[in-house]
Amino acid sequence: MFIGHFAPAFVAAAVSPSGPKLGGYFIAAQLVDWGFFTFAIMGIERMRIDPGATVMVPFDLYHMPFTHSLLGTGIWALGLALIVLIWHRNALAGLLAGLVVLSHWALDWLTHRPDLTLAGGPERYGLGLWNLPYIAMPLELGITLGAFVFYMRRTRGPIGPPLILIGVLLAFQAINWFGPAPAQAGLAIYIQALLAFAMATGFAVWVGENRYFVQRGGLASSTV
């Protein structure tokens, strides 16, 4: 799962008029991946390239207890929820931010082979849809585009920025699916991943600054 992680971010931004804007929820959506690749650079968490790992993704994510265990994800979610709650003085925004972070583990459980843990222990979990491209690919595109349409229907603003954002996300996904597989894990791939997250978030910030929440009465508010 790559751009599918941003689906909960679109939904949260569409229903939260006084919390973080879209860029903030994009950070929440990939927060544990930000953590993982940063930890990988530091040697705290580890991965390797294994062409036989799954049909779609050659990553053997064999050691990531601090970011991709359910407990670890929950701690990251709680931390961000508290930051958002304090910063925005809005309990709903804090709850949504935490749920977006937690959604990462659930979506990874759908696609990963069993490499996720509950608390870093030996038991591994993952439904393994990366071995079933005819299910995984429509699922990822479907939830992302559906959430994007929901966000667009709930907000108003220039059409150009969000179209560019969704185009960038689809381009990243195409590279992820059809680009050449890396020969080995290392600093280059970790930095590339972080740069991709930063670019996606940057475009989301741009979109969020130009979209306005549509209230039930049909009026637009710039308080998003």
Image (cartoon, rainbow, N blue to C red):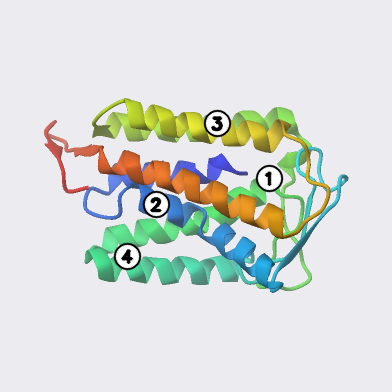
Mark 3 or mark 4, whichever is nearer to me: 3
Task: Give the mark nearest the N terminus, 2 or 3.
Answer: 2
Amino acid type for the residue under numbered disc 4: Val
Say which element carries label 3.
helix
Say which element carries label 1.
helix
* Residue holding disc 3: 170
Task: Give the mark nearest the N terminus, 1 or 3.
Answer: 1
Residue 109 location, x and y as percent?
A: 65, 52
Is disc 2 surrounded by few (<14), some (14 to 19) or many (20+) residues within 10 Å? many
Residue at the image point whose x is 53% and y is 46% from the top:
5
Distance of mark 1 from mark 4, alpha carbons? 29 Å
Residue at the image point whose x is 83% and y is 48% from the top:
183
Distance of mark 3 from mark 4, alpha carbons? 29 Å
* Residue holding disc 2: 25
Mark 1 or mark 4, whichever is nearer to me: 4
- Label tally: 4
Amino acid type for the residue under numbered disc 3: Leu
Distance of mark 1 from mark 3, alpha carbons? 18 Å
Return the mark for residue 84.
4
Residue 87 location, x and y as percent?
A: 26, 67
Return the mark for residue 62.
none
Residue 94 location, x and y as percent?
A: 33, 62
Up/down of 164 relative to 209, above or below:
above
Return the mark for residue 111.
1
Task: Give the mark nearest the N terminus, 4 or 2.
Answer: 2
Task: Give the mark nearest the N terminus, 1 or 2.
Answer: 2
